[in-house]
Image (cartoon, helix red, strand yellow):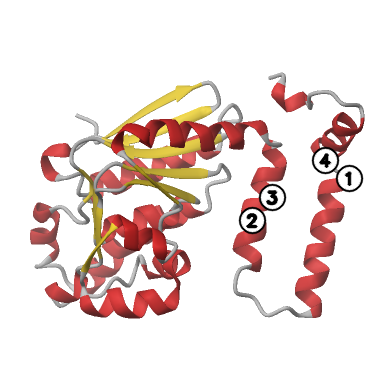
Amino acid sequence: MTALVTTIEGHVATLTLSRPDVRNAFNDEVIAELTQAFTDIGNNADVRCVVLAAEGPAFCAGADLNWMRRMADYTRDENLADAGKLAEMLRVIYTCPKPTIARVQGDVYAGGMGLVAACDMVVSVDTANYCLSEVKLGLIPATISPYVIRAMGPRASHRYFLTAERFDAKEAHRIGFVHELVTAEELDAKVAEIAKALCMASPAAVKACKLLVQDVAEQEITPELIADTVAGIADIRASEEGREGVQSFLQKRKPSWLEK
């Protein structure tokens, strides 16, 4: 039985974690499925937005206990190979050329925080709890740290990495880890609203904007960075969709990508 269910409606792909009996915890099989699914969706020209969802009371509880039992006996080389697969999954999600939305319907713990942080946008129910619990097990959230620190900032990371405190959705929203806080009844409508906005935009521009944020974030403002941004706007203005977008605006008509 697959751990991941993929559906595509219109231009929106939804990838749903489907292991509610183990709180959608991941193991090497789930990691492989997520990596492949995001790779495939990223190459699908018809898809303009990806929603990462889950079934059951928890969004993702981190590592599967059976997987952790196996890891307990791993050598360092085996741990390196294993962590490398998790790191590759997170990289593939983060660099997916399609914009991604995490639809958080329940609790998020440990490695699950990495899944959420690797997505571009996060919509969470107001009843969800969050926790970076690794230090309680004598571990550190190393592999997920590049994404979690980008999502919540170093100051909040200092606290929650070190204390392993559980914090609620309101706090997750306050520190910027979550973009939208809604009731369970409002969750699907808010996700659909954001997905619609993403599908209304130029696919090429959205892809370029995602790269722009990743390239510019926290960079020192140097002449080289400024030159890169100048080249970026020149390239997109001269592109097919860039020209079409400006022309359609001036001509007061819909751009071609809304007619597909």
| Label 3 to label 1: alpha-carbon separation | 13 Å
Q: In which quarter of the image is residue 65?
A: bottom left
| Label 2 to label 4: alpha-carbon separation | 16 Å
Q: In which quarter of the image is residue 167?
A: bottom left
| Label 3 to label 2: alpha-carbon separation | 5 Å
The answer to whether 142 appears left or right of 174 in the picture is left
State yes or no: discs 1 and 4 in contact (Cβ < 8 Å): yes
The answer to whether 176 appears left or right of 108 in the picture is right
Is residue 85 at all visible to an observer of this figure?
no
Is disc 3 surrounded by few (<14), some (14 to 19) or many (20+) residues within 10 Å?
some
Amino acid type assigned to the residue bearing label 2 in the image:
Leu
Q: Which image quarter holds the C terminus?
A: top right
Q: Regarding mark 4 in the picture, which secondary structure is present there? A: helix
State yes or no: discs 3 and 2 in contact (Cβ < 8 Å): yes
Position of residue 127 measured from the top left corner of the image (x, y, whole percent)? 24, 48
Is residue 164 placed above or below 70 in the rendered structure?
below
Amino acid type assigned to the residue bearing label 3 in the image:
Ala
Identify the mark at residue 208; answer none if there is no mark: 3
